[in-house]
Every structure is written in C-alpha cells, then in structure tokens.
Amino acid sequence: MRDIDVLVVGAGFAGMYAVHRLASDGLSVRAVEAGSDVGGTWYWNRYPGARCDVESLEYSYAFDDDLQQEWSWTERYAAQPEILSYASHVADRFALRDHIDFDTRVVSVVHANGRWVVTTRAVTDRSVHGDALGDDVTVWNARFVVMATGCLSSANVPDLPGIADFEAAGGTVLHTGRWPHDGIDLAGRHVAVVGTGSSGVQAVPLVAEAAEHLTVFQRTATYAAPAFNAPLDPDVEASVKARYGEFRAMLQKRATAFGASYPRAHPSALTVSAQERNEILEDRWMLGGFAVSAAFADLLSDPEANDLVAEFVRSKIRAVVDDPATAELLCPTQTFACKRMCVDSGYFEAFNRNDVDLVSVADNPITRLADRGIVLADGSLHEVDTIVFATGYDAMTGSLARIDIRGRDGRRLVDEWAAGPRTLLGIAVPGFPNLFTVTGPGSPSVLANMITAIEQHVEWIADCIGWLDAHDHVEIEASESAADEWVGHVNDLAASTLYPTCNSWYLGANVPGKPRVFMPVLGWPAYVRRCNDVAAAEYTGFAVT
Ligand code: FAD
Ligand code: NAP
C-alpha cells in the first residue's frame, strides 16, 4: 500500500489542473487515468467532426497567463486533434505526466481508518463495450480523493440483443466516445449513425462524405445552429490576448449560454414586435453557435417565448433541407434548448445528398441487431455493415457509479444516490469525508464553459485543503442538512424553468432506469458567489474535525 496526500481519478482537463495545482501547493499527488495519455474527452472522442462548440479562446485554461499567451488556436472552434495537442502541451509544460499512472482504472475507493484506500487495475484491452482489466492490483492510501472522472465519460451503448451476432458476422460497432485510435476507413461502407445529439450532428456530414451510404436513425430531432467555423482571425486573437484577464473576468459574469461572450440577452421575446424579434434572432443566428439561445432572457422560462424562438430555428431547417418531408422530420418539436442545443457544420445540408437517408425511430424503435443490420419494432431490416452509436453518455453520475465507492460506515455511493445524486455544491457528499467531485452533480458543470467550471472547482478544493492544513484540521465532510438544502435548491431552480419538460441527459432521461432528477445547478455567477461565501465563512455546511 502506497501513502499519498491526494489521489486524483482521471487526467482530463480537471485531473490535469488538479495535479498541477495540488502539487504546486506542496502535496504529494498521484493521478490514475484509464486512457493512455492526458486529455480525457479529447483523448477518447476521435470521431470525424469532433470539435468544441465553445470558442477556443474561451474553452482553454485561464490559470496561467504565460500559457494562454503562448498558445495559438488555428480555428474559432478547434477540432479534437488540436485540443488534444493543447492538453499534451499543458502536460509537457507543467511536467504533469510524472504524476500520472496511465492505462490504469480505479476500481474501488473505500474509506477506512480516516483514510481512503484506492484500488487500481491495469487496462489490458479496450473496445466499444468497455475496458478489459488485468489481475494485478495497486493499492493507494490517500488522505484526500479528487474525483475528476468527467461528466460525459461513460459511453451509453444501447443494450440491444444481437450486437455480438452483428459483430461476429463481420459488422463493425463504434461509439463516438470510444473511437478507434487508428481511425477507421469508412470508404465503401454502408454506415448507420444512431443518435442526433451534438456528437451525431458533428459526425453526420463527415461520415456522409466518407461512406458509400449513410442512414441516420433519429429518435428526437435536434435544434442546431451553424458554427460558422473559420480560421481564427489574428486580429481577434491579438485583441483578446491584449486583455485576456479582463476578457476571462467578463465571461465569469455571464449566466447564460455556457458563459460565452455573446451580447447580453434581451429581456423578453414577448415585449418586442415580430419584426424586431426576427431581426434580433437573425443577428444572433449570424453570430453562430449558441448565440441564438442567448437571445432572450425568458426563453427558458416562458413557453410562448420559447415557441417563438423554436419556430425561428425550424424555419432555418426548412430553408436548408430540400425535401419537405425530410425537413419536417428534422424539425424538433420539444422545448427549444431544454436539451443541450447543437452547433453544426453542414448537418442539415447532408440530408440533401442522395446517399444519405433519415429514418425516424421515435415511434418505431430499434429492437435488435441482426447479422446484416438494424431491426426496428415493425420488423423492418436496415442493412448496414457499420454502426456508429452517437448515443451519448450516462452523464454526470455514470463514471462515479462504475467505481465501488464506500464512505463512512460502509455507505455505498450508488445506494446513497439511488433516488438521484445528493451533494453539497456538487463538490462534496455527506458520508464521504475528504472526497471531492469536480464539476459533480449539483454544480453548474455542463451548463457552464466546462474548463472555467473545472478551474473554479479545483481552486476551491485546493484552497479548502490548504485551509484544513493551516488550521491543523484532519477531515472535512458535507453535512446531511446542508446537502438536503442544496439538492432542494437545485431542484427548485430547475422547476422554475422549462428544463424539466423534455427528456434530456441533464435529467438522466437518456439512460433506462436512471432517476429523473435535474443534475446541474442553474446560474453560474450565483453559484460562484455561494462557493466563495461558504469558504469565507470557514466552510459553513461542512463538519470539520
Ligand atoms: P473528462 O475529459 O471526461 O476526463 C475524465 C477522465 O477520467 C477520462 O479520461 C476517463 O478515462 C477518466 N476516468 C473515468 N473514470 C475512471 C476510472 N475509474 N479510473 C481511471 N480513469 C477514469 N464542454 C465545453 O464546455 N465545451 C465544449 O465545446 C465541449 N465539447 C465537448 C465535446 C464532446 C465530444 C464531449 C463528449 C464533451 C464536450 N464537452 C464540452 C464537455 C467536456 O467533457 C468537458 O469540457 C471537459 O473536457 C471535461 O473534462 P474532465 O477532465 O472533467 O472530464
Ligand atoms: P446526446 O446528446 O445524449 O445524444 C444522444 C442521441 O442518441 C440522442 O439523439 C438520443 O435520442 C439518441 N439515442 C440514445 N439512445 C438511443 C436509442 N436506443 N435509439 C435511438 N436513439 C438513441 O449525446 P451526445 O451527442 O454524445 O452529446 C452529449 C453531450 O456531450 C452534448 O450535449 C454536449 O454537452 C457534449 N458534446 C459536445 C459536442 C460539441 O459540439 N462540442 C459534441 C459532442 C458532445 P433522444 O434525444 O431521444 O434521447
């Protein structure tokens, strides 16, 4: 058993910054990562078209001014290989790999005698269905554990009968988040893309170009706005870099649209004339990305306002897609932006190709795979040789639930969270002292620019550990009552909006059997204030021993 101050699980942007900050604070730190290198999301998601949808000048670390000055992005929205190179550059620059065990999975985290016993096993093989693990175990004895396991890192591959038969008959099964690292040649293939969320929307245009034929299986049509991606304008880069600190501080104050630098929202879609509303929406549309979802402050609270914006986006889809029946099928009907909106580059245009078909599985679901393809409830067979599941993730709780985490008195995290995740600030869980979650359920997390959210969490956690040590405290634990109050607050905020009206992964609705609970907290600036107030008041809501 090896003794250590802090064991960090995961080496995506969260784990990397946690290692850097905690090691810089003089603590002994080890991170354990299932992948073979740093980058997390950007290490795993190598599907064609993968790129960020928050602009790269914003979707990058702010903690080191030299780093943000020296790195140059080539595009407005960087593609996956460039973001992975950035992660690698950060790892080199701060010698992070010295602190990380790669190709290793944490299988259990157990509280014993006031410490955490963390057991890891080597990853010996990987496939779309998960990792194979070796028999050798390593055991760490840590004072603190930081779970930097990612909100979107547990692939949700539908449990369909016949997958093994399809593969045995020569078919290829892929998931966007477990993409083969050597790439895959789709030339000559008949490909299915199942799922039309952000991953499917990004992959479809490029898969369409590469494959012989593409069939897209759509359960819920999606709202997407064009990225208008382009090479990064050197003047824009120079002007941001000239005042990067100020620019980041301005983003911190933004409460909507993933904290992006869009113009402030107009108060209401209902208090402007139809012509004015249309002009505002057109202006936002031309900005690209999520700007349209930040047009009016009431669009996620007032159904009428929401419907006006939804209809505007539907009109854009109808204008792009040639075949009226296909256009109608691609027009979403659920509340606009209550599932995470997508940002596309040629998604709707792809359906104008002769070699791309759209199949609705909303009322006629996929029931199984056969040797030669996908079978729907009505018995119809769609012949394909390659299936790309763009079916998303067991979001926010999945990667934690896959580890055997046992707190004080043997309490199991999966039992504690059986009715939904229960945290204080998305950072700490009652019964699990000295264990922190980065961007966990109950924090803004996936509703924020996630690198910003990660930095805020890591800094809060590191400051907390520093404060404990400075005051000779041994342990910190969220109180039951404070966590109950916080979960109630998270639920109340969500209930005051239209977010709960559709089946999003924010609610766990994409995973069969998962409790329907809105997991992230709304409102970035208020959340940050709350975290700061808690720390300033010597960790109110926490028991310190
Ligand atoms: P991750 O990057 O998911 O890293 C977690 C790591 O933990 C993984 O590498 C995983 O292998 C490891 N891990 C998990 N469990 C274990 C275990 N038991 N043992 C060992 N290792 C383990 N967010 C934005 O803000 N803007 C965007 O544009 C954006 N684009 C995205 C695009 C895609 C395709 C996806 C899937 C997500 C995107 N996100 C985006 C969200 C993205 O996940 C975050 O921005 C960010 O990269 C998360 O970093 P992380 O370190 O918290 O988690
Ligand atoms: P997702 O948003 O959950 O979308 C999954 C899609 O698969 C949905 O269309 C879903 O339909 C469908 N689906 C799931 N199971 C299905 C089944 N059994 N049969 C048919 N369809 C099924 O997942 P994602 O696209 O991977 O995106 C997840 C999140 O990752 C995003 O919201 C975003 O936060 C992040 N991301 C960002 C980018 C980016 O642009 N930077 C790219 C990818 C991912 P339903 O809607 O009906 O459930």
Image (cartoon, rainbow, N blue to C red):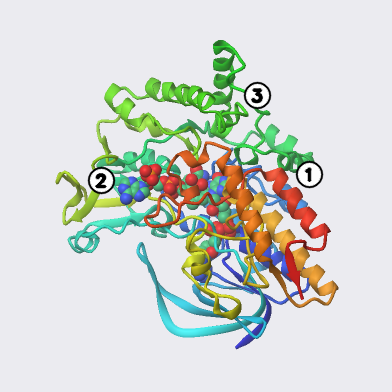
Q: CA distance from mark 2 to mark 1?
A: 50 Å
Q: CA distance from mark 2 to mark 3?
A: 40 Å
* Marks 2,3: beta carbons within 8 A: no
Which amino acid lies under the numbered mark 1 shown in the image of this protein? Gly
| Quarter of the image where ligand 1 sits | bottom right
The answer as to whether callout 2 falls within 8 Å of ligand 2 is: yes
Q: Quadrant of residue 465?
A: bottom right
Residue lying at 31% horizontally and 30% vertically, measured from the top left? 329
Label 2, residues with CA under 10 Å away: few <14, some 14-19, many ≥20:
some
Residue in the image at 41% along x and 36% along y? 222
Q: Which residue type does callout 3 highlight?
A: His
In the image, taking residue 210 as reference, residue 113 lies left or right, namely right
In the image, residue 350 lies at what x, y percent? 35, 33
Q: Which residue is mark 3?
A: 266
Crowding near pointer 3: few (<14 within 10 Å), some, many (20+)?
A: some
Residue extending farthest to the front is 481
- How far is disc 1 from disc 3 in space, using C-alphas? 26 Å
Left or right: 466 as drawn, with respect to 457: right
Q: Is residue 471 above or below residue 388?
A: below
Give the camera-side residue of 506 and 74.
Answer: 506
Residue at coordinates 20% horizontally, 64% vertically from top-left?
Answer: 168
Along the line of sight, the residue nearer the viewer: 393 or 234: 393
Which marked residue is nearer to the observer: mark 2 or mark 1? 2
Q: Earlier in the sequence, mark 2 or mark 1?
A: 1
Residue 89 visible in the current orientation: no
Residue at label 1? 245
- Amino acid under disc 2: Pro
Q: Position of residue 472 (x, y in %)?
A: 83, 77
Q: Is 7 placed above or below 384 here?
A: below
Q: Which residue is mark 2?
A: 365
